[in-house]
Image: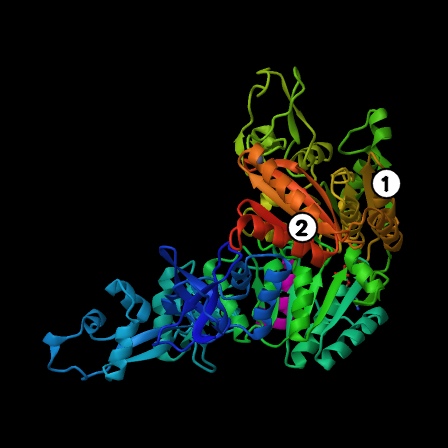
Amino acid sequence: MDERVVEVALPLPLYATFSYRVGEPWAVPPRGARVEVPFGNRKAVGVVTRSGIAPPASVELKDVSDVVDEAPLVEPPLLDLAAWMADYYLAPPGECYRLVLPPAGIRASRTVVRRIAGASAGDESAEDPLLLALGKGAMPVSRLASRLGKDPTAGLHRLRREGRVEIVQDIRAPAFRNVQVASLVDGAEDPKPSAQAEVVTRLRAAGGRMRVADLVRDKASLRGAVSRLAEKGVLRLEEERDVRSPEGLPLRDVGRHTLVSDQEEALESVGAALRTESFAPFLLHGVTGSGKTEVYFRAAEQALALGRSALFLVPEIALTPLLVRAARTRFGDEVAVQHSELSAGERHDQWWRIRDGEARVVIGARSAVFAPLPRLGLIVVDEEHEGAYKQEESPRYHARDVAVMRATLEGAVVVLGSATPSVESHSNALRGKYRRLTLGARIGAHGMPRVEIVDRRAVLKAGGDAILSPPLREALAERLARKEQSLLLLNRRGYATSLLCRECGQQATCPNCSVCLTLHGRGVRALCHYCGHDVPTPGACGVCKGAYLRLSGYGTEQVVDVVKAALPGARVERLDRDLAARRGAVARVLAGFEAGETDILVGTQMIAKGHDFPRVTLVGVVDADVGLGLPDFRAAERSFSLLTQVAGRAGRAELPGEVILQSHWPDHYALTLACAQDYDSFFEREMEFRRTMAYPPAGALLNLLVRARDAGPGAREADALGRRLRDAARGRYRVLGPARAPLARLRGEHRFQILLKGQRAAMRAAVKGALVERYGASRWPGIAVDVDPVSVM
Ligand code: ADP
Ligand code: ZN
């Protein structure tokens, strides 16, 4: 063992870690501290995973070129979490550590060398080259090294002994910006000149305090008046830290409710667990509209009262501006929001506020599970069944499962909430692994909405419209007449689903992927939903050059057109991923709908999630079969929960709700049981299927994907790995494939998959063994390992 040797993980797709020596000017950084190291012919910032280790034999160790953090910026549980992820998901350790460490650009401290004044006075000519490079003042060691073109460590050590330089850690405060704020001084006299009077009026309207930038935003000429008022002592100017935070909806007081007895009971269990300050996992199964949010918020209040912090995970933050607002109303400035749309500046500020304990309530999507909250007491995973919690790129973690592990490491309480718990979580609750809490009834006056299935085969036979059947159209018209609102779900965006050649019957496909192009913009553009390929809709068939092309199928765009044509005068808006690509657009559409400026909101699953609109009394599902036919073992579960969730948007307040599903497949159990809102029967039915097929939770899955430019070599790799994995199985798991993945080509790459079913630990060990044997310990080119895959497409 050598005290000065550290093991470093680099944020690259590398499965190995690397050893470096820490030169003398630095103290040896502990686990979790970042260091800059030479790697190949460049520098990279990695993280120390162990320090004081045995130097590997036979390699000459390089020195770290800079110590970024003297001490880790996050607490040990987060570091343990990263290490666990790397191991459990067979993921590159550096990529896992990067998730828990500050965003790039945040520097805690760095090592600086400073000239000791007067030490070399009078002897300038005989100066050491190091001192010459250093100049008069101070400089980070890393900059000195690059200026010299070599490692200054040994020389600095000598100069320090000679008392000519000192080596210090420079702790840099995070780079917050300041803004100027004006506040009215009590009892000051009202000013006469009109500009000054206007400033005072504006300030009063804003409650006496306002940012100067906002005060003069539309009228720059008021700036002079602000200064003069400050001189007169009518107002006070102060600097305030500007925390860049994302725009939200205007706050609205939603009030506090007296809990109903189910809520009371659930809260009592969670509260008792919080007070024991140890790990406790709960599954909160509450039907739609049963008041889960109130339970979450009360639990968070209790956590804060105990001096601990709270983390809320939602499947997709852009879809939940209403939840964010409710949390802001309840917890004020303590709330920080984290999601992928944040700018670098916002991310930086939010990270520091959380890390320093200023924002003790964090709301965010998937990656917020790594928020650096000190003394974390409560984690809520809302809509825990959502597939969006799974990250589909490396590291392929599931935020719900990571949340449970984090709670274990932090000694925290974790609450998984859903109206339709995932089959896995429900089975965990039945086995006693999670404690089950139930909110069995809706809060509103009318209970669950009435659901009707319209058989589309009959509608089409009778000559009815494929998109709006007569019953659905009538129901929409009734809502318009009564000034109530409707949601129309179609889980398919775009205008048409494909472009069909009438001569040869072929569909236009993506040149990079084995999927059809979708038509957008009333059919003028053809898009691939997987790789982003985007071209004007071709005028001739790519196969036979035939010129008679036809749009077939329909998506949300076309539904909007059809609804507008059928119900002139209806105010219709659309909400789907195309719209969400514009920053702030989701919040705008939801706010307009909430304010009653929209009658009918058409959208994909985005409209099904978590929203609480009291005037929605009708939910129409244009095509309830979307997704049911996919070659994916979770297809039925996904349909069941989507339909249950969207049905749950209707009739949440004083007005009763109605749901209409249009289907070609009205007898499918996912549909009939969603209509009956019968979760327990669905679960049993689905478990039977999972047991028969040894799908989760009856057995674990691991999907190994081989990607290659050319099909031949890809297939050969997959075959070799498949053979090796079969040989190692010894009855502990089964190997399916290799076979072409359902999405056989994606972004120009051929895809082969090997699906393993069985005991997770044995599968992980075998896969790791096979990959190390074939490719070595560090790089596994073209291979994607997915432990507990959510989608096997
Ligand atoms: P869920 O998330 O379970 O679907 P919500 O948390 O959105 O349900 O609650 C549904 C509605 O009931 C909301 O409008 C909420 O404000 C209201 N609500 C929640 N708890 C109570 C209560 N104890 N009394 C009255 N209204 C409540
Ligand atoms: Zn494509």
Q: Nearer the viewer, residue 377 or 160?
A: 160
Q: Pointer 1: residues within 10 angstroms few (<14), some, or many (20+)?
A: some
Q: Secondary structure at mark 2?
A: helix
Could you tell me which residue is drawn at 75 percent across and 69 percent down?
A: 281
Rendered location of residue 28, percent (x, y)? 43, 76
User: Left or right: 96 with respect to 597?
Assistant: left
Any magenta on residue 294? no
Q: Principal SS element in the magenta part? A: helix
The residue that mark 1 highlights is: 668
Image x and y of residue 486, in percent: 75, 46
Residue 599 percent across, percent down from the top left: 71, 45
Question: Given contact means CB atoms under 8 Å apart, are the residues at marks 1 and 2 in contact?
Answer: no
Nearest to viewer (mark 1 / mark 2):
1
- Judge by depth and name the residue closer to the eye, 760 or 432: 760
Of the image marks 1 and 2, the number of the one nearer the N terminus:
2
Q: Looking at numbered disc 1 in the image, what kind of residue is underneath it?
A: His
Secondary structure type for disc 1? loop
Determine which of the numbered discs, if any, sits on residue 753 in the image. Answer: none
Q: Residue at x 37, y 77 (%)?
A: 169
Quadrant in which the C terminus is drawn: top right
Q: Amino acid at mark 2?
A: Phe
The quarter of the rendering in which ligand 1 is drawn is bottom right
Q: Is residue 334 magenta?
A: yes
Determine which residue is flagged by label 2: 593
Q: How busy is the neighbourhood of tag 2: few (under 14 within 10 Å), some, or many (20 plus)?
A: many
Drawn side of residue 290 relative to residue 187, left or right: right
Q: Which residues are magenta?
A: 321-335
